[in-house]
Amino acid sequence: MKNLWNDGEAEKLVADYAKKGVARDLALRVYTTRLLGGEPRLVLHGGGNTSCKTKAVDLVGDEWDVLCVKGSGWDMGVIEPQGLPAVKLGALLKARSLTKLSDEDMVALQRVNLIDPSSPNPSVETLLHAFLPHKFVDHTHSTAVLAIVDQDDSEALSEKVFGSKMGFVPYIMPGFDLAKAAADVFDADPTVEGLILDKHGIFTFGDNAKQAYDRMIHYVNLAEDFIASHGKPRTEKAALPARLAKPEEIAPMLRGAVAVARGEGRFDRMISDFRTSDTIVDFINSAKIADYAGRGVSTPDLSIRIKTGPMALPAPDADKIGDYKSVIRSHVEQFAKDYRAYFESNDGLDDVKRTMLDQMPRLTLVPGLGMFGHGRTLKDARIASDVGEMWIEAVRGAEAVGDFRPLSKADLFPLEYWSLEQAKLASNKPKPLTGQVVLVTGGAGAIGAATAKLFADNGAHAVVVDLDASRAAEAAKKAGNGSIGIGADITDPGEMRAAFDKAVAVYGGLDILVSNAGAAWEGRIGELDDATLRKSFELNFFAHQSAAQNAVRIMLEQGTGGVLLFNTSKQAINPGPKFGAYGIPKAATLFLSRQYALDYGAHGIRSNAVNADRIRSGLLTDAMIASRSGARGVSEKEYMSGNLLGQEVTSEDVAQAFLHQALAERTTADVTTVDGGNIAAALR
């Protein structure tokens, strides 16, 4: 591992922060924390922590000796000074004389001694940092160090690799007890430059930021060098099918299998992030991959991300792809059964009241292909995949020098069901569409963009499809929540299929279709040329059918139902003069929506339509509004609000109707009218 310390960069950061009133110690603490946090082999997604002991002034001007330590929720790779809240050191040091301190009391002690009460909660390992006397303390979950400590003979192997300059701390769950034990190990030999925590990670310390950082890189390199020079031959590879299925073929099956059933056709869905590389595939093709997966996580912190460890599937045979859905489901069922047994056997050991988390895996290994991270959001799914890559590196290293033996699942349980973590989870309330994927055609137009944004605001990840790729990307960016834009001519079946395949590639599947794209051609129906009418049917009917077919194909593979939503327009009910080319295919699309409701209701797939009128959009342009209002002898405002309510209807109002239909779990074959009131267009 390369030492990234750079004197010039360090001094520049010190100077920049000095202008903002940040002292040198804290600025250098930020600098080396970022160096550590930017290396995934050391720190992943909120893991690890650092500290420095310095002085700070409180709100009334009193100066205190403080510990500036990483705050909960901060990413070390991009940390700022406020991500290292200052805690009064004297109170923390007094805690060492206590014989016991509950986790809740420990958090309270740390919070009540914050210099700034608005700061985030200090790290759960704050006391460990405080009890060590050094000015700077660094802690990481180095994959190379984990390869050394995830062994049955971890203490002896650590002595061999690191020598006498590193103390060894037997595994204890993070918190007060670990802090006292680690401090006792240091006191027994104050010459050590760091501590190796069994099954957990590594601490290094020093009198200045550079010394602590240098020591971290040095001891991690000792571990890496040992693995490289003592590695055993690679394990035997599993036999693979002659022809492997593709990731996009199995992704919807897997995504459906890991959805959490809530009864009566309701599911908490997850996003799937597919990840592959030569390194990933080489490792998971091992004949022992199911064994490795069953042994657990490489460091207990990962249980928060991937539960008790990955799930391993057999390689998918392309010639037997029809059977693979049942293979996936049987493995998921076994994983869930094992997880329930894990919970019940450990939960029964005390009187603490706990609620079992869902039993679904968060990381799935597929020999020959790669791995899928699962999460309630795309961010969570990607984190699971990131963790999977580091799990592979740690396990490979452990097997190279010995036998991967991580913390037992019985010891893992108290951390996964830690009261502090349970409190975090309880405060994390999902949105109505969290975990769901929506694809919107005509997504860059007024109605499509408003719908994509509203669905994203309610937790969905949106796939914005539009003929104009740049506008689709812009609409997706405005929608936010990890949404993507795709350019496609949806009258081309190949381009339509590719758009849906992209949704599967990025998110693992699809739950909601908003088939919204359309355009109008004018002319009296008896004088309209066939080419114009056929062109209108291609976009205003057949493209809706193509979109629905693709959506249903994916939804059936998932087996968790879904929603088809069609924009049918007022013209489908109340045709206007010279708009037959538009209204006739729209009327057909209205009945198309009902046919899907009829044919796929038994599969939990709902189909509804929105009947909207007079919405400012690419269809009803400013020029068209001016023309129509002028022809009627009214103002543009009067024309746009010419309904029973006397109010203009907006694209956001249509989006609200689509959202209502998506959330109305017992509604199908519905037509919702959004026009401010037009009796001629009301359904009879």
Image: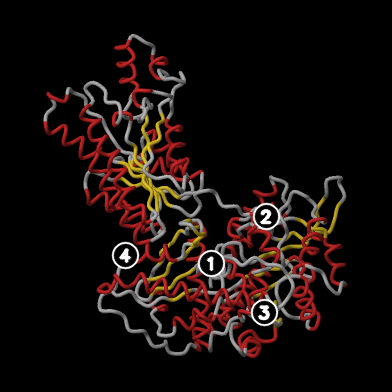
Q: Earlier in the sequence, mark 2 or mark 3?
A: 2
Q: Amino acid at mark 2?
A: Gly
Q: Which mark is residue 196?
A: 3
SS for callout 2: helix
Q: Quadrant of residue 153?
A: bottom right
Graded by Cα atoms within 10 Å as few (under 14), some (14 to 19) or many (20 or more), the crowding at tag 2 reads many
Question: Marks 4 and 3: which is nearer the front?
Answer: 4
Name the side, left or right, on which 156 lies relative to 452.
right
Distance from the alpha carbon under mark 1 to that under mark 4 = 30 Å
Q: Earlier in the sequence, mark 1 or mark 4?
A: 1
Distance from the alpha carbon under mark 4 to that under mark 2 = 43 Å
Q: Is residue 494 visible?
A: yes
Q: Which mark is residue 83?
A: 2
Distance from the alpha carbon under mark 4 to that under mark 3 = 44 Å
Residue 492 image position (x, y, % from top left): 21, 46
How many numbered marks, from 0 up?
A: 4
SS for callout 4: helix
Distance from the alpha carbon under mark 2 to that under mark 3 = 25 Å
Callouts 2 and 3 close, C-beta under 8 Å: no
Callouts 3 and 1 close, C-beta under 8 Å: no
Name the side, left or right, on which 410 lies relative to 252.
right
Distance from the alpha carbon under mark 1 to that under mark 2 = 19 Å
Callouts 1 and 4 close, C-beta under 8 Å: no
Where is mark 4, residue-wise? 249
Callouts 4 and 2 close, C-beta under 8 Å: no
Q: Is residue 6 visible?
A: no
Where is mark 1, residue-wise? 40
SS for callout 3: strand
Q: Residue at x 58, y 59 (%)?
A: 77
